[in-house]
Image: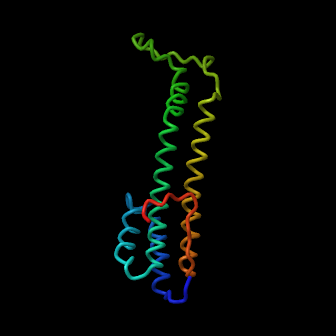
């Protein structure tokens, strides 16, 4: 970036990225704090404007990917849960006894695989979020522009 970026702008851009970690303390803090920091300082510097947009766009993208993953995983999770609960005979509830039929449970089925894949993908989103945010913070503090991967540009 150009040499007109001062230490205050670099620090503020880094804080915008770091403020996304507030989601672990404050609900929706990953949107609220960066948005407040960005909107209050975006007119002062194009550098802060760029980093603010990147941080917010990335957080919206991660939220969107998480919602899509959750919606895709719901049918498989319900199927897995039904298989898991299925070895308790729920249809004979009037007999006042619980009939455990362990021989009917087939173990690992396709539903388990889908639940495991969804879990690994969710973990991948978490790792992507943490590592990219740390990388963006470091780049911003060094005075370099950073573009998050897999980001949909909602704010241009």
Query: Residue 30 at x, y = what percent?
Result: 42, 62
Which quarter of the image is occupied by the C terminus? Answer: bottom left
Q: Is residue 107 above or below residue 143?
A: above
Residue 43 in the image: above or below residue 72: below
x and y, in percent, of residue 153 in the image: 48, 61
Q: Residue at x 46, y 46 (%)?
A: 67
For this orientation, the residue located farthest to the front is 156
Front-most of 5 and 28? 5
Task: Give above or below for 108 relative to 45.
Answer: above
Q: Residue at x 45, y 13 (%)?
A: 91
Q: Looking at this view, is 118 or 139 the one in front? A: 139
Find residue 3 and report its horizontal and vertical position in percent: 54, 89
The residue sitting at 38% across, 68% down in the picture is 35
Q: Residue at x 45, y 68 (%)?
A: 53
Residue 134, image quadrant? bottom right
Among the 4 quarters of the image, the one containing residue 20: bottom left
Specify whether 35 is left or right of 115: left
Q: Quadrant of the N terminus?
A: bottom right
Display colour scheme: rainbow
Q: Position of residue 64 (x, y in %)?
A: 46, 51
> In this view, which residue lies farthest toward the top?
95
Q: Which of the pair 82/133 is nearer the observer?
A: 133
From the viewer's perspective, tell me whether residue 93 is left or right of residue 76.
left
């Amino acid at each position: 970036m150009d040499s007109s970026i001062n230490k205050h702008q670099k620090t503020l851009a880094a804080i915008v990225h770091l403020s996304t970690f507030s989601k672990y303390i404050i609900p929706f803090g990953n949107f609220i704090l960066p948005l407040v920091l960005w909107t209050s300082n975006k007119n002062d510097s194009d550098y802060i404007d760029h980093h603010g947009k990147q941080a917010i766009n990335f957080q919206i993208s991660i939220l969107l990917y998480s919602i899509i993953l959750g919606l895709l995983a719901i049918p498989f999770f319900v199927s897995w849960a039904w298989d898991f609960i299925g070895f308790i005979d729920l249809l004979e509830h009037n007999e006042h006894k619980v009939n455990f039929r362990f021989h009917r449970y087939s173990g690992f089925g396709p539903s388990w695989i889908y639940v495991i894949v969804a879990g690994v993908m969710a973990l991948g989103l978490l790792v992507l979020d943490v590592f990219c945010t740390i990388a963006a913070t470091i780049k911003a503090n060094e005075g370099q522009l950073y573009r998050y991967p897999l980001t949909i540009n909602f704010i241009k």
